């Protein structure tokens, strides 16, 4: 069986939807960015519709606020949320392999 290898295409960072933050993750990201916790939370997060989590906000195009363009990268890669670290093993959606460059090698 082939192993997934990220090609840094950035597709997963451009999918619209929540990037839910677990307990302690907003503090860790704020510290990494050298921001006060309150400032980070008010500028870079929203409360999810189910009111269970904070989520990173999206840019107008639906990509993550911390997505860096060409070549694809993450401004908070060292402290990115567990949800991001778990891709593609813990979250995916139907036909995600067709969009993700790293997954195309698995097809």
Image: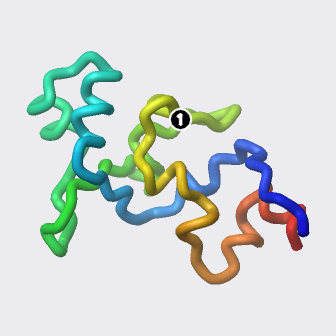
Compared with residue 40, is residue 63 higher up or lower down, i.e. above or below?
A: below
For the C terminus, give its image quadrant: bottom right
Rendered residue at 21%/61% (across/down)? 53
Task: Give the image location of residue 58, x and y in percent.
Answer: 36, 51
Q: Residue furthest top?
A: 34
Rendered residue at 62%/65% (across/down)? 89
Task: Give the image location of residue 76, x and y in percent.
Answer: 45, 31
Badge 1 marks a residue whose secondary structure is strand
Rendered residue at 16%/59% (across/down)? 47
For the N terminus, give its image quadrant: bottom right
Q: Which residue is mark 1?
A: 74
Q: Nearer the viewer, residue 70 or 22?
A: 22
Compared with residue 75, is residue 10 higher up or lower down, i.e. above or below?
A: below
Q: Residue furthest front?
A: 1
Q: Residue furthest bottom?
A: 94
Q: Nearer the viewer, residue 61 or 73?
A: 73
């Amino acid at each position: 069986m082939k192993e997934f290898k990220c090609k840094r295409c950035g597709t997963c960072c451009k999918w619209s939807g929540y990037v839910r933050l677990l307990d302690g993750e907003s503090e860790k990201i704020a510290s990494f960015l050298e921001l006060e916790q309150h400032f980070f939370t008010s500028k870079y997060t929203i409360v999810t519709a189910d009111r269970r989590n904070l989520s990173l906000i999206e840019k107008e195009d639906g990509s993550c606020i911390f997505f860096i363009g060409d070549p694809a990268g993450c401004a908070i890669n060292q402290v990115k949320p567990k949800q991001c670290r778990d891709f593609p093993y813990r979250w995916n959606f139907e036909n995600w392999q067709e969009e993700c460059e790293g997954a195309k090698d698995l097809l």
